[in-house]
Every structure is written in C-alpha cells, then in structure tokens.
Amino acid sequence: MTYPARIWRERHSRYRLVGVRCKKCGAIYYPPRPVCEKCKSRELEEVELPRRGKIISYTILHNPPVGYRDQAPLVFALVELENGVRVFAPLTDVDPHSVEIGMDVEAVLRRINRKEEYGVIPYALKFRPLIR
Amino acid sequence: MRKVYVVGVGYTKIGRLYHRSLKDLFAEAAWKAIEDAGNNMPQALVVGNETSSSLQDQDNLGAYLADYAGLGRIPAFKVEAACGSGGAAFYTAYALVASGLADIVMAAGVEKLSDARSSGTTSALAKAAEADYEAFYGASFTSINALIMHYYMHKYNIDYEYLAEWPVAMHEYASKNPYAHLRFKVTKEKVLSSRIIAYPLRLLDASPISDGAAAVILASEDVARKITDTPIRVAGVGMSTDHIYVAAREKLDTLVATIKAGEQAFKMAKMEPKDMDVLELHDAFSILGLISLEDLGFAEKGKAAKLFSNGAFHLGDKPTVNPSGGLKARGHPVGATGIYQIMEIAMQLRGDFPGVRVSNAEKGLAQSIGGAGTTITITILSR
C-alpha cells in the first residue's frame, strides 16, 4: 500500500540510502533498525551508505506484479556496497542479458511503480551499471 | 513437558478446487482426522493459514472454522507464518498438549488460493517478504528465491542441469500420490526447456498454486493409548526465525533458521540426521530442497545437487526425501503444507501412506519454511 505517510516515513532510507551505525561496536545496518544485532546496543546513529557497489546475485523477473508490468522484465539484485553492507534493489538503465555477477553498479533515484494509490508516485533508489 | 502423540490425520485432495471453499476444505480434513482418531473431539484448534485475510476477506479464522465445522465452543485461533504457517501451527498445538493445558488438540492447515487471478495470489504471497524494502520494489516471492538460487549456483559452480533432477523425481512420486496436485511425470528435457520465470529459476522448479486442507490430532500419552494402537510420537520440535530482509543475512547459500530449528529438534529427540528414514522438506522451489538437505546435515555445503542426481535420497536410500512429491508436485496450499508434511511422515511411520511408501520407516522429519527462510519449523516423529 502506498499510503502517503508510510512513503514519507521511509524517505531518508529510500532516497539517500540512510542506514544506521552502532555507536558501541560500529556495525552498520540497512534498512535502519533500533537495536544492534551483534552487541544489542540501542544507541545507533544514522549514516549515509556508499552509493556504489557490486552485484553478488541477480534475477530477471519476467512477469512482475500489477503496477510494475510496464517495466518487465524487471531485474533485481543483491548489491554489496563499498563498505560491505548488502542491499536489495532493482536495476535500471541496463539490458537484462548484459547483467553479470561482479558487475559494478551505482544508485540513482527512479520512479518505482505505477500503482498511484492515494495519489502518491513512489520514488526510491535503483542501481545502474557504473559509468566510469 | 508431557509426551505428545499424533493419533489421527485427515486431508483433502490438493489442487485448483474451484468448487470448494476455505471452510468447506477445512471441515472435510477436520472430520476425517476426528474419525481417524476414533471420533474423539479436540479440546482446542490451532489452524495454520497465510492468506485468509488478503484473498478470502476473512479474519477471526479460529472461530470461523471451529463454528462452521461444528467443533463446538472450543479455544481456536490462527497461527500465521507465511508459507510456514502449518509448521508453526503444529508447534503451537504441540505446546498446548505438552504443557498440559489440553489433552487432545487439532493442528490444522487450510489455504484457498485459486479464487484470485494468479497476479492477485502472487501479490498476496509477496506479503511474506519485507513490505517496505523488498515487496515495495515489485519483488515477488519467486524472485527472492531466484536470488538465493543464483547466488548458490554461482558460488558452488553448479550447472542448472543438476538442479533439474529434483522436479523429475518429485513429479514421479506425485504421479503415485492419489491426493497430489500435479499427478504427471516430467522428463529432464522438459524441465530444462520450461519457461524461465525469474532467471535462473524455471516454471518447473516452482511449486503450483494450490488449495487444500489437512489436520492432525495430537494427544497426551494417556489419551493416545486409549485412542489408537499406532500412536506416532512427536519426538522433537524446533523453530527459528531469521532476517526477513534477505540482503541482511551473513550467508546467502544457507538458511540459518533450518540449522537452528534442526539442532533444537534433534536435541529434543535425542537423535541424529543419520537416524532419519524419511524426510518431507519444503521445496517450494527446487533449490530450497537441496539447500535444506545440506543445512540439516545430510550433505556437505554445495554437494546436495550432485548427490541427488547420482541417486542419493531417492526411494531405497536412507533417508528418502519427499516421497509425497514435495511442494513441487504434491502441491503447496501454503498454510496447510506444513500439516500435510507432518501427516505424511506420520502415515509413512504407520505404514498407511496412500502413495509411495518407505518400507519399515521408524523415524522421519518434516521441515516447514515461511518466507525465504525467515520462519522455519522442524518436526521429528518416531514410531
């Protein structure tokens, strides 16, 4: 559901790749969470994650859900960012058949779907092949 | 804790059962189980179900089903853990009997998926994933499993050809299972040429969209002895959860929750993997069956696919995996699947499974997975 308030609550993580870092042990998490999984500290601070990384796995979804069909086939990847944190994200601006594990990618802001429930157009980061 | 026994089982045929409703399926399975348990009525009902709210507009499922099926004004509630709801419902029902809160309890599972268009069902099942950071991006459940499959194949350099052996074996078993959803055989060539739905995952790697219901009756030792000469002991149970956001997991080629739940169940049962005669693993996609064999200690990491294609874990080997046909071909009525699996192990141990039987099976294990390895229950049964 693209409730306006729900979209707004996640804006920092979705638009700027904001995660959290544990002030005690330094572990970094994405998306943000209130407790450090490793040391159970509840003192975590927001931190912007690197926008570049490598694909460690990907899939090409040929029949995406309603609201995403104009983008078919949709490519999803697990991306390991430069600091080692892993994120799940769609790929964009790429021929699906040219995607490879190990490919360097960077985050860009893109429209996510065409559901337009509640009049909101949801945006978030996708990843594209790194332009050197 | 008290000892707990399975004293009755009941089930419906699995399939796209357009003429059957959610409550109608439940009532059939429930009463077959009650009859199998010598017409002894359960004192409580725990029902596993994933999508009654999203696809059938029905919450308050415990009361709805207990009322419709005429079980009386008993305590009744739904347990939801996505496609692992059945295993989680059994775990809860086990606790009710083991604790002494009730002496005889029904653990059931029911799912009605086929009323919606496939796109609607797929969207409902995607709710098992992280809503804001996975499903939001248009990820289906299949695509998340495909990411795990691709990672695994790349890391261990496994050709797809090895994975294709799994569906062939599952369809062979299901062709002999009278209540299975996909009762036809497939060749390896057919698997290899089936449509890619989420690269590298093909249509014949995936379990079907199924309706169905199953129920087992659990009883304390005193009650079990009065009801049946063939009580099946619940020797061990274990349950674990993991990061729902798959990218947050340290390892992507293993389901840590299987390892943890398995350790608990084996410890409680005072058994080891080598003691198992028969397994029912949660192969919603072929890759999950293979990874689970490894995580439970039946194969080294990265080796299960080759072992399986060389004949290991087939009928005649110990353990035999998924003689029901598995989720792949017996079918996957999601919240009911975990109960079907436990019921199948119980029937294998009793010697009255209606499909392919593992001869003289004494011990068996069922694994129920919710989400992409997020909630996992392991149940060990013993004759």
Image (cartoon, coloured by chain):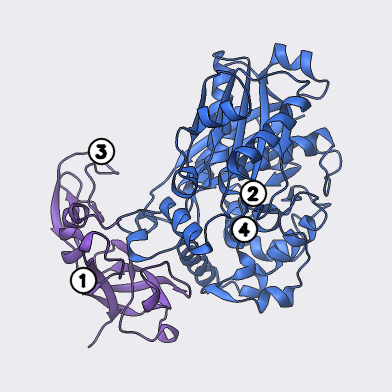
Chain colours: A purple, B blue
Q: Is residue B358 left or right of residue B94?
A: right
**Does label 1 lie on the same chain as label 3?**
yes
Marks 4, 3: nearer the viewer: 4
CA–CA distance in space, label 3 to label 1: 27 Å
- Using the image, determine if residue B224 lies above or below residue B187: above
As drawn, the label of residue B290 is 4
Look at label 1 and name its amino acid: Arg
Residue at mark 2: B281
Say what amino acid the circle numbered 4 marks: Leu
User: Given the image, what chain letter belongs to the residue carrying mark 2?
Assistant: B
Q: Is residue B225 left or right of residue B335?
A: right
> Looking at the image, is mark 3 or mark 2 nearer the viewer?
2
Measured as percent of width and height from the top left, residue B122 is found at 49, 60
Find out whether the residues at labels 3 and 1 contact each other: C-beta distance under 8 Å: no
- Residue hosting label 1: A51
- Seen from the viewer's position, the closer of residues B150 and A123 is A123
Task: Find numbered disc 1 in the image and state the secondary structure of the residue it sits on.
Answer: loop
Look at the numbered disc 4 and give the secondary structure of its residue.
Answer: helix
At 29% from the left edge and 44% from the top edge, which residue is drawn? A38
Return the x and y of residue B4 as percentages of the image width and height: 65, 21
